[in-house]
Image (cartoon, helix red, strand yellow):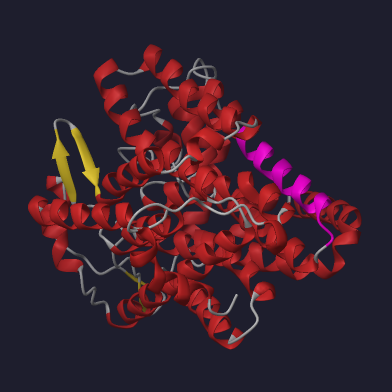
Amino acid sequence: MEGVTLSIALVLSVLIFLVSPVYGLIIYIASLVWYPSYLTVSLGTIDFTMRRITILALLANLYLQTNLPGRFKYKWLDILVICYFVAQIVSGVFTTPIMKLLENRAGAVFDMVLPYFAVRMIVTNKQQYLMILKAILFISAPLAIVGFYQCLTGYNPVGFLIKYHGWSEVRSAGYVALFRKGFFRANVTFSVSGMFGFFFAMFGAVCAGFLRNVKKYKFVYIICIGLMAVGVFSSMSSGPMLVSLLAVLFMAFYRYRRCWKIVLVALVLICGMVEFISNRHFYDVLGDFTIKPQTAWFRSRLIEVALFEGGMSGHWLLGFGYGVEPGWSTKIDGREFTDIVNHYLLILCRFGLVALVPWLAMNVAAIKELINAYKTTNSDSNRWLIWCLGAGFFGLSCGLMSISLFEQSTTVFYMMIGFAGVMPAVVARTKANLCTTPTYPFQNTYSRGMYVMLNRNL
């Protein structure tokens, strides 16, 4: 199967070289979503997924055939993305065998850093940003339909490919349909259903910003947004549903955004009252309303053991190391390993405060970029675009308390960070002074069809 994966990757790479960077980014997103993440090409100890090969082609195209890298200007967000990555390496040097660390972080470069900088360099104006959102909707809609089919029947059309999984224990087990609350948990091309749902939850809120920027056939895009919700439901996972719910509430608050201080104070008071009346943490009470309260209890105990019962004792600064068992499960449910379904705790456990602090700073810097962009424009459509991206971050920041990002969802997260980084430039440029992307031989011919399709209704 490695030969098939490599052949498809080479074909997509050639296509990326034949089109302009923004369309190359769209091809990359399609490869990220539609090709199973567990099908890899091994090069030594590093496994190259489809997205890792196509991101190399995308960046090579940028550097070899455009002047976009030369026009790129660093900002604090870019520096913090790099600092977070470097902090993981610095921490890992003291806690993890060096070859294991280099192997893991080498893969992280392809999944985190490169997609972020690809977005930062390619997206230079609003038209390009809207084209990407439109493409994401069209790419995601069929995936959501297939996911819903799997949710109803338990049949995954590409489930047979699991026998080519890179991990022998998964390969031997084969595809197993998981059942919950009368439905099957869809994953389609993703390794686990939670990440499948997270993809739709994360990009769904972002793509909702497209609705106030479209002139024709708005009902088509409303249907596509609705299919995003179907994709979230098909995962039958509480984490993506929580992200979607919070993102929708945040978007609904757009009309009343001037009252944000009152709402913030009210939320703090409500959480305090819940803790006082129930004598439990507010997140414990919320867990009673999830799809599976038992897993919500586990997540609550995970926080308590890690932060308040000595779980991080002696490891606060540098963490336990990558792939090291912290032993928290003995205080939770007695299982053999600790399933750290909390992204904040996962970073803290692996790399300590040395990495968690720059990661949090990176997120704060991304939000600051959105705030700056919001202040620079008076256009309602622009502000809605910013608000929806902010809604995605708001829902995700809460959802990461219940699940950890990996594989495709990690890449989607860093693409969202990249969207935040380009947003000030996106809303600052009107159609009268768009900064166009340079073209070069053969691109116009091969890009024309995609250009007409993606720009027809903008």
Displayed quadrant of residue 57: top left
**Residue shown at 56% from the left, 29% from the top:** 356
Q: Looking at the image, can residue 392 be seen?
A: yes
From the top left corner, tell me how far across and down residue 109 is, in percent: 38, 34
**Residue shown at 71% from the left, 62% from the top:** 432
From the top left corner, tell me how far across and down residue 327 is, in percent: 39, 29
Q: Main secondary structure of the magenta part?
A: helix
In the rendered image, residue 384 lying in the magenta stretch gets the answer no
**Residue shown at 20% from the left, 69% from the top:** 158
Quadrant including the C terminus: bottom right
* Of 165 and 239, the residue lying toward us: 165
From the top left corner, tell me how far across and down residue 194 is, in percent: 41, 59
Q: Residue furthest front?
A: 441
Quadrant including the N terminus: bottom left
* Of 295 and 333, the residue lying toward us: 295
**Does 2 appear above or below 347?**
below
Displayed quadrant of residue 274: bottom right
Q: Looking at the image, can residue 281 be seen?
A: no
* Of 440 and 435, the residue lying toward us: 440
**Does 66 appear above or below 451?**
above
Q: Residue furthest top?
A: 94
From the top left corner, tell me how far across and down residue 401 is, in percent: 56, 47
**Does 41 appear above or below 348?**
below
Q: How many marks?
A: 0
* Of 11 and 445, the residue lying toward us: 445
Q: Which residues are magenta?
A: 362-378
Q: Is residue 249 left or right of residue 375?
A: left
Displayed quadrant of residue 325: top left
Q: Is residue 7 left or right of residue 22?
A: left
